[in-house]
Image: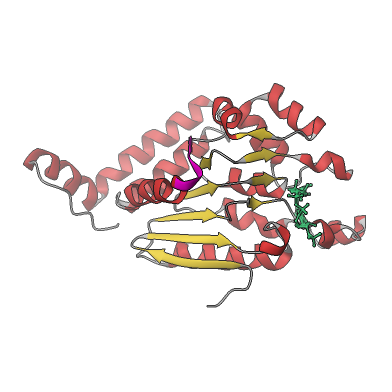
Amino acid sequence: MSYKTIIVESVGKVAVIRLHRPEALNAINSELIGELSVALRSCEAAPSIGCIVITGSEKAFAAGADIREMADKSFSDVLLGDFAATWDCIAHVRKPVIAAVAGFALGGGCELAMHCDMIVAADNARFGQPEIKLGIIPGIGGTQRLTRAIGKAKAMDLCLSGRLMDATEAERSGLVARVVPLADLMAETMRTAEAVAAMPLAALLLAKEAVNRAFESSLAEGLAFERRAFHALFATDDQKEGMAAFIDRRPPHFSRM
Ligand code: CO8
């Protein structure tokens, strides 16, 4: 399938989706989010893909939702059209997704990065929820995911003032997994993505689901889910292979199931 606002390529078991609207700092319009959801669905369905990387350009991961597209919308337009609902597709991806963020990740761009399972940031990355300056608030999880990631004090600071946070502060606050020099961003991210993609798929899916449960449930419920998922993995060939390979001192050959 050919896309207009994203570029998709596969490198071994890793799919790389690059946001590509250079004329608007990768501002996310309905065409881009539609294409992104199609690409993600196709990565989900491809047995050869074990990990997905979403990235942008060196200047911008994404400078937010497209303000020009939103500017004239009315309350009934956004309510009746369920504006932003397409974004839910990202949260429903079961395979691991890594955001490789350079430059601006603002508004919907920061929220897109936070939909991913981990963020690797270049040292020029800047994160923020500047919607307040436009007379709105974050609409696809910024007030919720950011608060869970960095706590109330900093989330309030960013959402109420619209100020931007640099990569160092983002790492210190727990928003990003690691910061690397801009020149190394893709190589570092791909190294991580390839290592993840080499893991047994069933364990990857359940590990992701179990970590995400921590945000949705009580500790007791989360622990119960984790225990059941842990038990279930003993039904897979990959558990037998992984443990046999360890004992035999050889590399494992996982079946991908
Ligand atoms: N939407 C549309 N166009 C944009 C956007 C955007 N978010 N950001 C940048 N652009 C365009 C600019 O208009 C400009 O286009 P042109 O050259 O045709 O005038 C081009 O990109 C380059 O931008 P700048 O000249 O402004 O570049 P600078 O380096 O001077 O500044 C900034 C970079 C600081 C990133 C600046 O562009 C900026 O402040 N952008 C807007 C950031 C913002 O407010 N983001 C939040 C948007 S609202 C949002 O994301 C809400 C999401 C909620 C849910 C959405 C559901 C769909």
The image shows residue 150, relative to residue 201, as above or below, that is: above
The image shows residue 110, relative to residue 174, as above or below, that is: below
Type of colouring = secondary structure
Viewer-closest of 16 and 255 = 16
* In the image, residue 182 lies in the stretch drawn in magenta: yes
So how many labels did they put on this image? 0
The spot of residue 44 in percent (x, y) is: 46, 62
Query: What span is in magenta?
Result: 178-183
Q: Residue furthest top?
A: 153
The spot of residue 144 in percent (x, y) is: 68, 36
The spot of residue 162 in percent (x, y) is: 79, 35
Which image quadrant is residue 166 in?
top right
Residue at x 54%, y 30% (from the top left corner)? 171
* In the image, residue 169 lies in the stretch drawn in magenta: no
Q: In this view, does 152 lie to the left or right of 125?
A: right
Q: Residue furthest left?
A: 248
Q: In this view, does 247 lie to the left or right of 255?
A: left
Is residue 121 visible to the viewer in this orientation of the structure? Answer: yes
Is residue 118 visible to the viewer in this orientation of the structure? Answer: no
Viewer-closest of 252 and 31 = 31
The image shows residue 220, relative to residue 256, as above or below, that is: above
Residue at x 65%, y 25% (from the top left corner)? 151
Which image quadrant is residue 227 in?
top left
In the rendered view of the protein, which quadrant contains the C terminus? Answer: bottom left
